[in-house]
Image (tube, rainbow, N blue to C red):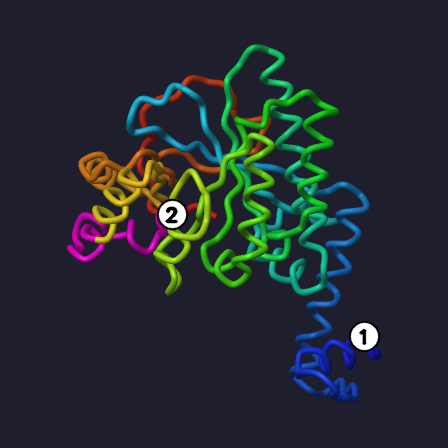
């Protein structure tokens, strides 16, 4: 363990460095905690303790296809559920995130195939990490799973953040084209959070713009947010893209999004993330649920 801590400390400091383990250094204590968490994640992967939840996405334009975003959780050894913030960053740092992405994609394709065989239309949204963006082996994995299950991948939407896409633009272009060739749709997530949003619109082929939550919170009372949402919705329409607003927390926000021409809404006012056994993915879209002050994860 001490050697591993020193090695990762040296790596984080840059190239051609040497680090000596010191149990009294706060940095090394923090690194030890992350290594312990990484080992917990490895065991969870080996023991198949990942869990999917689903959060409903509401169409504001009458789209009849039921739509949900799939959200991964990790069941700890004590039975508690860890939220993404508690394990995804460590998974990415220690090279485990791509295995998680593959697991989620495999589960999503299996869900699609099962519902399609039952005659149900369904649309599922799946997040991809920055490390998986450009991983053509992942594309092959998706293609093989679709062939194995018989799933029609037109019901599968992969979400990538605009920041990750711009950071790896050439790889992102190739990767998204390959996914589109399989029939998948693409969503540009957290749109507006970075500094190159319009560059991503110009250079990436995608189907949805997912407006960053910072522009949806307090939308009703913030004229700047209103202007941003209106502009993004109008631009997306002119480009033939659809828009999704995250973090919708009340009826007033939902009504304003309809007025602005946003296509879909998501948030605790629409529906909380629920375990798959607690939700009917194929149920026809309904009106929003009672409001809540908490935010989706």
> Is residue 87 shown to the viewer in this render?
no
- Examine the structure image and report whether residue 214 is included in the region drawn in magenta: yes
> What residue does disc 2 label?
294
C-alpha distance separating marks 2 and 1: 39 Å
> Is residue 33 shown to the viewer in this render?
yes
Q: Which residues are magenta?
A: 211-227
**Left or right of 292 in this view: 83:** right
Residue name at image x 71 percent, y 63 percent = 94
What kind of element bears circle 1? helix
- Examine the structure image and report whether residue 185 is included in the region drawn in magenta: no
Give the quarter of the image for residue 75. Answer: top right
Where does the image place residue 163, in percent across and percent down from the top left?
47, 60
Residue name at image x 35 percent, y 38 percent = 241
- Residue count near mark 1 (Cα–Cα under 10 Å), binned few <14, some 14–19, many ≥20: few
User: Which numbered marker is on residue 152?
Assistant: none
User: Which numbered marker is on residue 4?
Assistant: 1
Give the quarter of the image for residue 112. Answer: top right
């Amino acid at each position: 363990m001490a050697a591993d801590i020193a090695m990762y400390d040296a790596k984080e400091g840059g190239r051609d460095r040497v680090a000596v383990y010191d149990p009294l250094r706060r940095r090394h204590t923090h690194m030890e905690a992350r290594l312990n968490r990484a080992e917990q994640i490895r065991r969870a992967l080996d023991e198949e303790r990942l869990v999917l939840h689903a959060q409903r996405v509401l169409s504001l334009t009458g789209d009849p296809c039921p739509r949900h975003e799939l959200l991964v959780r990790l069941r700890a050894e004590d039975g508690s559920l860890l939220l993404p913030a508690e394990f995804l960053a460590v998974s990415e740092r220690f090279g485990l995130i791509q295995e998680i992405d593959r697991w989620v994609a495999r589960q999503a394709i299996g869900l699609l195939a099962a519902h399609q065989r039952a005659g149900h239309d369904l649309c599922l949204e799946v997040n991809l990490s920055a490390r998986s963006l450009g991983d053509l082996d992942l594309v092959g994995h998706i293609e093989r799973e679709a062939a194995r299950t018989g799933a029609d991948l037109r019901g599968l939407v992969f979400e990538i953040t605009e920041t990750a896409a711009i950071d790896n633009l050439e790889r992102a272009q190739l990767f998204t084209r390959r996914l589109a060739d399989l029939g998948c749709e693409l969503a540009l997530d957290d749109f507006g959070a970075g500094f190159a949003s319009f560059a991503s619109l110009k250079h990436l082929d995608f189907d949805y713009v997912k407006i960053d939550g910072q522009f949806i919170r307090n939308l009703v009372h913030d004229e700047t947010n209103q202007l941003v949402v209106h502009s993004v919705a109008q631009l997306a329409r002119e480009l033939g893209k659809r828009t999704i607003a995250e973090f919708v927390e009340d009826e007033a926000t939902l009504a304003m999004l309809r007025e602005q021409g946003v296509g879909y809404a998501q948030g605790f006012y629409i529906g909380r993330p629920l375990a798959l056994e607690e939700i009917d993915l194929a149920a026809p879209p309904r009106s929003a649920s009672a409001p809540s002050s908490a935010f989706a994860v």
